[in-house]
Image (cartoon, rainbow, N blue to C red):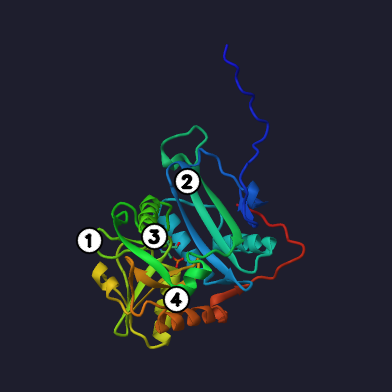
Amino acid sequence: MHNLPKLSEEYIDPNTYPPGVAFMDGQYLTMDKAKISVLDYGFLHSDATYDVVHVWKGAFFRLEDHLNRFFRGMDMLHMSISCDKAQVTEILYNCVALSGLQNSYVEFICTRGTSPDFSRDPRDAINRFIAFAIPFGSVANEKQMQRGLHIAITDIVRIPPPSVDPTIKNYHWLDLVKGLYTAYDQEADTAILLDSNGNIAEGPGFNIFVAKDGLVSTPEFGVLKGITRQSIFDLCKEMQIECVARDITPNELKAADELFITSTAGGVMPVTKINDKPIGLGSVGSLSKRINEAYWQMHGQDKNRMAIDYPTKSEVVDGC
Ligand code: PLP
C-alpha cells in the first residue's frame, strides 16, 4: 500500500521576502503573508492588469496618472473592483504609511480572480484587487547608472497590439524575459524588443528615448504609454527641447547621440552601449544628465506629489 503524505495544517513558505506591506481581501499584511490562490486566473492565465507608482522622499509621484491608467485597463479588460479611485488611493496610502518606507515601489493589481467551481468562463470569476508597498527598486543598479546601461537590440518581437494591447499594463512578459536572456548571452544588461513592423518597441519594464541632433524621440507604436515617458514629454516642453513619438529603426538607435530608458522603477536611466558598440562618446551624455536631474526636481512640485504622513498608529479602513 502506498503511504500517503499527511495534508499540512498550514502552509510554511520557505522563501524570504522584502520588507513592506500588502493589502488583499480587506486585510493589510506583511509581504510574507500576502498570498493568492493557485486557482486565480491572474496566475494561471496572466489574466490581470496592474500599475506601479513610486513614493519618493515620503510622497507619491503622479499618482493620479497611474490610477487613471489602472482604471482604464480594468475597464478594457471587463474587470471591476468595488473600490473607486479615492478608495484605492487610501489603500495605497495605508500600505506605504504602514510600511514606513520613504522611498517605495507601490504596485496595485487586479486579477481576473477565481470562480467557485473553476468555471472557464471569465465572466464567472470574482476579480481580485491586491496592492503592496516594498522598498524602491530600479531597472538600473548604481553601477549601471554611473557607467550607463549596456543594451542589446534583439530580434524578438513584442506581442503585437492586436493580440495584447500594450497600453493596458500587463504581465505578458515571456517575450521580455526571452529578451533578457538574449541580452545576457551577449553580456548586455538588458534588452530592446522590436514592434511587429521591425521598429524599436520597448524593453523589460521601460520605454526608450533617442536623442539625435537636438531632437528627442521615443516609439509611439506597440508600447506602454509610460508615466515616466509622459514626464519626459512634459519636461522637454518646459526645457524647450523638441520631443516626438514616432517610429524609430534599430539603425537610428545605433547612430544616436544619446540614449536613455525610462521607468517608474528608476526614473531616467542612461544607455552608453548598444550591441557592444558605444553610443556617442561612450559615456553618459549631458542631455540625459540634464533630463534626469529635471525629472527628480519634478518630484518636489506640489501638483505632482501627494505627501504621506507616516503615523505611529494606523487607522483602520474598510477594504474592498
Ligand atoms: N514598458 C513596459 C513594458 C513596462 O512594464 C513599463 C513599466 O513597468 C514601462 C514601459 C514604463 O512605464 P512607467 O514609466 O509608467 O513606469
What is the CA distance from the residue labelled 1 to the residue labelled 3? 26 Å
As measured in the structure, the alpha-carbon distance from the residue carrying label 1 to the one carrying label 2 is: 30 Å
Taking the image as four quarters, which one is ligand 1 found in? bottom left
**Residue bearing mark 1:** 197
Q: Can you see residue 154?
A: yes
Of the two numbered discs 3 and 2 on the same chain, state the one appearing first in sequence: 2
Q: Position of residue 194 (x, y in %)?
A: 29, 61
**Above or below for 193 versus 79:** below
N-terminal label among 1 and 3: 3
Q: Position of residue 259 (x, y in %)?
A: 36, 74
Q: Marks 4 and 3, Cα distance to the nearest angstrom?
A: 31 Å
Which residue is tagged 2? 42
Label 3 sits on residue: 187
Residue 249 visible in rendering: no
- Farthest-out residue, right: 313
**Which residue is the site of mark 4?**
231
Label 4 is placed on what type of residue? Ser
Say what amino acid the circle numbered 3 marks: Glu
Residue 95 percent location from the top left of the image: 64, 60
State if disc 2 and disc 3 touch (CB < 8 Å): no
Q: Earlier in the sequence, mark 1 or mark 2?
A: 2
Classify residue 11 by image quadrant.
Answer: top right
Give the mark count.
4
Residue at 65%, 30% (x, y): give it: 8
Q: Nearer the viewer, mark 3 or mark 2?
A: 3
